[in-house]
Amino acid sequence: MNEVLRRIYKRYGVKIALYLIIALILVDTFLTYQYKQALGRNIEAQATLDEIAASKASIISNLNNIDMSLRGYLLVGNEAFLDTYEKIKGQNAPTMTYLKQKLPEIGMDASNLSEMDAMLNSYFKLMDEVILLSKSGTTDAALKILKEDHGTEVWQTYMNMSGVVDPIIQAKKTESQEAYTKLLNMSLFFQGVLFLVGIPTLIYTISSLTRSEKRRTKLFEDLDLQNRTLIFDSNEKTNVQNEAEVIGNIITNLNKTATFIKGIGQGNFDVKWDGFRAANVKTNEHTISGELIAMREEMKKQREQGLRQQWASDGLNKLTEIIRDHQSDFESLTGKSVYFIVKYLKAHQGGLFVLNDDDEEDKHLELSTCYAFDRKKFVTKRINIGEGIIGQVFLEAEPVYIRDVPADYIHITSGLGEANPRCITVQPLKHNDEVVAILEIASFAELDQHALDFLITACKSLAASMMALQSSHKTKILLEKSQQQAEEMRAQEEEMRQNMEELEATQEEMKRREADLRIELKK
């Protein structure tokens, strides 16, 4: 019998020990879970009971505050005391509703609150009468009601209710605490058993594994392989017989992983993986290190895209504010808008050429506003339709972007002035597919695509505002002309009326003279 047990012990001892530890851990886990559940229930029950007690206590506290507020109001006449009263009065109904809801949950009949609720409602009605008396000028009558101390009856009713509620609350607290304490003691007891049984079993397991050199070597070979396959492969050979080296490599790689993830979490998308070089990029293509680096690049790309979108959104919002603040003056609108666009793009020169179609036979572009190197340029310039880059862009209604501008370009083709920019963009300002102006921007640094996209959207907003302002201006001019013509017509009508009166007077005079002449002839 002993020989059989010895063979079983030798062959299955480690497994039995491990199964025993697992079983103990599972039981301990279950008891710990039950303990945590009980702890949560206890905390919740204690909090609910405390809240019930606090709500109940607030009744008498509010009663005292009402009495003090009304007395203060009657003494000094300050309306602020009535605000306090109304606030407390408004809190009464929610408090009573809450108590009526929660008291049945702890096994108490909510009907015990009915008398208290009725007393409070009666008391509030009486206090409302006190306020009405005071406001009507009969302060003495109001003070008389207060001196009768009707709150004493409410207070006595509250004490009677407390005599019933408080013992139940305390009993529920004690019951909840006892249930929690019972599970806590049970959990502590089993953890002690787990410690006493598990430690010797664990020692035995470790001893058995130590005696198995071959399996241990195989284990560390597997660990090193998994470390290289899953986390990071530095392409450097590891001595698997050296346990410290194998474990150290794993810990180092885990620390690198944690540092890398922490850096990304803190927004540092330039964080590097120590030891990651071009020579081992292919090896680590599917390791955690490789995946993390690929994730970093993608997040970096997304962040840059988000920053670009935010930059464009902020710029358009600021431009909208400028347009809104200067929508009544065309020169101010265009000047401020062009200045902002040039500054926001960190460009150096900018000019707005607006279509002048006052004369249908001589349509041309006029330089409305021009900024260069943060200063407004007062330049008079006219460009015919189709002349140079600006005139061509007006005809074709498509933007032009020029890189590596020749040294003499600005003097020959551009309308902006003296410097030699590195790039120039000419943008048509279109409204309902009709070009109304041309914006030319010159910069010493190239504008990337997101800046050009922002510029296109900004031009659309500016074009719509310009057209609205020009339309309003034209309407105003037409209205003024119409009013002037009406005045002229009224003046002409008045002149004709005076002429008619003079003609009638002349006719009357001629008739009178003709009558006098006839009389003379008869004589």
Image (spheres, rainbow, N blue to C red):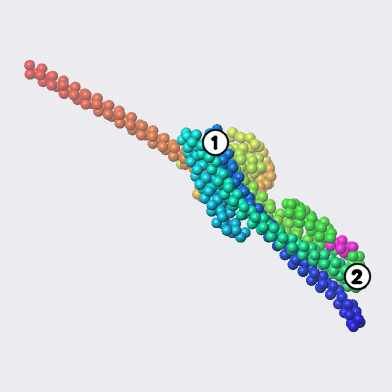
Report the quarter where the C terminus lies.
Answer: top left
Residue at 60 percent of width and 57 percent of height: 103
Q: Position of residue 19 (x, y in %)?
A: 81, 73
Residue 364 left/right relative to 175: left
Which residue is at 91% across, 65% downward? 242
Identity of the residue furthest to the left in this view: 523
* Residue placed most toward the observer, 460 or 193: 193
- Identify which amino acid the numbered label 1 is placed on: Tyr
Range drawn in magenta: 244-250
Does the rendering let one see residue 199?
A: yes
Q: Earlier in the sequence, mark 2 or mark 1?
A: 1
Which circle marks residue 73 in the picture? 1
Task: Please name whichever residue, 263 or 350, is drawn nearer the observer in this view of the structure.
Answer: 263
Answer yes or no: is residue 80 visible: no
Q: Quadrant of the N terminus?
A: bottom right
Instruction: Give the answer, above or below, for where 413 lies relative to 260.
Output: above
* 252 part of magenta stretch: no
Q: Which residue appears at 78% of the width and 56% of the height?
A: 260
The answer to whether residue 37 is above or below residue 58 is: below
Distance CA(mark 2)–CA(mark 1): 85 Å
Q: Which residue is mark 2?
A: 207
Kind of residue at disc 2: Ser
Which is in the foreground here, disc 2 or disc 1?
1
**Which element is circle 1 on?**
helix
